Image (cartoon, rainbow, N blue to C red):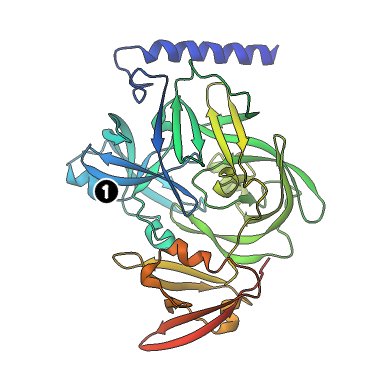
Amino acid sequence: MKRFNHHILKLILICIITMHSFSSDGQVFDFLEGKDKVSIPFEFKHNFLLIEVRFQNVVPLTLMFDTGAEHTILFDKVYTELFNIPYDRKIKIYGADLSKQLFANVARNVRMAIGGIANIPRDIVVLDEDYYHLKEITGINIDGIISPSFFNNMVIKIDFKKNLITLYNPVAFKAPKTFEESEVEFFKRKPYINTTAKLQDGTTLNLKLLIDSGAALPLLLHANSHSSLEIPENVISGKLGVGLGGAIEGFMGRIESLNFSKFKFSEIITSFQDLSDSKIAQNEINRNGLMGTQILSRFTVIFNPITEKVYFKPRKNLKKAFKFDKSGMIIYAFGPHLNDFIVQGIIPNSAAEMAGIKIGDKIKRVGIISTKLMKLGDLLVKFQKRPGKKVKLKIQRGEDIIHKTLILKELL
């Protein structure tokens, strides 16, 4: 009876949305402009989905599409100040580790044009300052985040082969027969999926994961979110990635397998982060972790928030091994062209430590190629080759130029 009522409720919701979509304000499906679907191109760089928008239909910006975000966010308030856009109110938001309180401003009815589609008004959040520093960490100019709420209740398809996001009117949408259907839960418009994970010690766990297109990693688990979920013995500590408020600290290791729907991944590189019980309760974190783009990009994925379904169609790279840095260096990009590469961290017992690389070293050349000809992503690929491969580096340390040879090493 409960299940029957649940489906009836969904049908009622679809009817309400249908009526509202043809109302005079046109706020629900304003992106569709009377069509059943529209497509938006994106670039897939550094495992981020990047969409070009025109802020106030004038200023070109690059926003990252993030299914794990509740709000659409601008990192720099210079754009709202440029157009004298007033703020409705100031709000507090939590950083990546859920402990640091940050401040942001709510701006109402800000207009953005995306992919030649309607210049429409949306409420956005504008940070007091750029807490992400994604430019330095990724080597890419990223001006903010666009969340699924920006597209209201439309069905969203992400095609990683064609680099297209397609928006569908949910009333006209028909589930494709070539996709595998899975039930998900949408909480604050963010999708959560039930999975089964097997740890290296043989422990099997049922885990609830956020499907997060804003996480440029395969898998992250909150180690204290389950009584049997513990950090494995063979891990490395350091920066797992970047989030609101800065770097996410934790551990990196592997789990034996992850299953969801009919799909199975083995020997997954997994990040482990500890969150205290109070932080979990205070921030309504009802999940065991998240699944990022390094898994998500192996599918064409469709999200239907109305029926609470997600559809997966595997790509040819489904079973491809996950790549991981074997240098042990944490490198940031600086300079006007984001091609000044400076070492910000060294993992203990890594190839970089054994070669005598130090924090603050500036990488000038890899092999015979000048780093002036590289993006950060190009550089990092050089350090994902097979263990034992030698990589020659030209380094600037202060006023000195030195030469080093890395012997890439498997850390996990």
Above or below, 109 relative to 277? above
Image-quadrant location for residue 74:
top left
Mark 1 burial class by Cα count in 10 Å: few <14, some 14-19, many 20+:
some
Q: Position of residue 99 (x, y in %)?
A: 50, 53
Q: In which quadrant of the rendered view does residue 151 lie? A: top left
Q: Which corner quadrant holds the N terminus?
A: top right
Q: Tally the numbered discs.
A: 1
Q: Residue at x 59, y 60 (%)?
A: 250
Q: In the rendered structure, which amino acid carries the disc numbered 1? A: Lys
Q: Is residue 87 left or right of residue 214?
A: left
Residue at image location 56% in from the left, 36% down from the top:
300
* Residue bearing the label numbered 1: 77
Secondary structure beneath dot 1 equals loop
Question: In the rendered image of this protein, does residue 272 appear above or below residue 313?
Answer: below
Relative depth, front residue between 294 and 236: 294
Q: Which residue is at the front of the view, 178 or 285?
A: 178
In this orientation, which residue lies closer to the viewer: 26 or 8? Answer: 26
**Picture residue at 48% right of the left edge, 16% below the top:** 172
Residue 154, percent from left and from top: 45, 25
Relative height, residue 395 to residue 237 (above, below): below
Question: Residue reaching furthest right?
Answer: 202
* Residue 208 picture quarter: top right
| Image coords of residue 4 (percent x, y) | 67, 12
User: In which quadrant of the rendered image does the C terminus lie?
Assistant: bottom right
Decide: is 323 above or below 113: below
Residue 294 picture location, percent across and down = 57, 49
Q: Is residue 225 left or right of residue 133?
A: right
